[in-house]
Amino acid sequence: MIELLSKPWHWSVAGAIIGLIVPILLLLGNRVFGISSNLRHICAACFPAGIDFFKYDWKKEAWNLFFVGGAFVGAVIASTVLRDPSGFQIADATRSDLSQLGVQDFSAMMPDDLFGIAHVLSLKGFIFLVLGGFLVGFGTRYGGGCTSGHAISGLSNLQWPSLVATISFMAGGFIMTHFGLPLIFKLF
Amino acid sequence: MQHIDQPALETNTDFEVRSLDAMCINDSKLVEPWTHNFKYLFVGFVFGVTLVKAEVISWFRIQEMFRLQSFHMYGVIGVAVLVGMVSVQLIKRFNIKTIYGEPVMFNKKPFYRGQIYGGLLFGFGWALTGACPGPLFLQVGAGFLAAGITLLSAIAGTWVYGYFRKYLV
């Protein structure tokens, strides 16, 4: 069993499980699947600073913090007990494109030459960790949701504004990948 | 199990603010004992294992997606949307109730321009970090400790949005 679970999971299996989370959360207690709200709940719980946007009863949303806590434990188990010794997958074309940009480490799911602890205090760390993370946090809240809240929950309920948001963040990703990254890698 | 009599609209004085935020208004009128939250912990656990084992947390998988060089991520998201859509339709069609016997509530998401601007900014960050908000937490759990900075910075980004919200459309 452990051996089977340790192998990389097919996209259809992962997609089906993630899709089923939508009705499971609804049926367990009328909860809407959406992870980025947790960032807001953390702000409301830890640093509300009198800002209206963070003045609400975050404890009512504690279920979502439990959800993300469980997910965190899941990630720990998946990368230890269920670790796949054969490594991870990447398309040849992507590997060759990224090599040309200057990525050298292809040994794990996050390249060490961008996301290694050694780069935390460098310009690389500033761009990929600090700036990147800031954009994710600011952008998801400004946009009212992320991949789970808009693309999966929103589209499941046929909400066209979620389609607009999904198209927007996919467009943002394409722009950053094809126009931003080549410029950024010139800095190093 | 304790029922609250007022409708959700009245109990949420900040309904206007929260309604722009997709996730916050779907209040169950039931007050669950806090221990019931452990069921969400279990669902989250399955979610976390799935995202790591299907490499959704991989920076490389996200690059493949934005370079149109692999079907993997499109498969994951596409199947998830399809399964979610069919499930929601079934819940509506057969009026399936929650495990507490409440009707399932669905909320319309109003359109506002921030969905475009915010979406674009999130997309920039997604391509840089390889993380949407789920993987933000999970990259750390999977042992990529530097992603802890990404997570803290995302919390800061959300806070800054909250601070400047009144000036943003």
Image (cartoon, coloured by chain):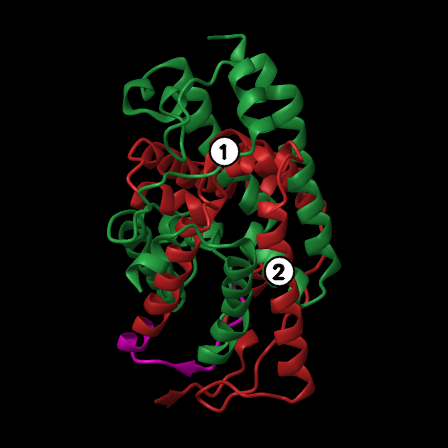
Chain colours: A green, B red
Q: Amino acid at mark 2?
A: Val
Q: Is residue A148 above or below residue A89?
A: below
Q: Position of residue A175 (x, y in %)?
A: 67, 28
Q: Is residue B163 something that shows in the picture?
A: no
Q: Please tell me whether residue B83 belongs to the stretch shown in magenta.
A: no
Residue positioned 50% across, 80% down in the render:
A27
Chain of residue at mark 1: B
Magenta residues, start to end: B24-37
Judge by depth and name the residue closer to the eye, A166 or B6: A166
Residue positioned 62% across, 82% down in the render:
B91
Q: Is residue A151 something that shows in the picture?
A: yes
The secondary structure type at the circle numbered 1 is: helix
Residue B60, disc: 1
2 or 1: tag closer to the N-terminus: 1
Which class describes the residues within 10 Å of circle 1: few (<14), some (14-19), or many (20+)? Answer: many
Q: Could you say which quadrant of the image residue A64 lies in?
A: bottom left
Residue B79, disc: 2
Residue positioned 61% across, 38% down in the render:
B65
Chain of residue at mark 2: B
Q: Please tell me whether residue B33 belongs to the stretch shown in magenta.
A: yes
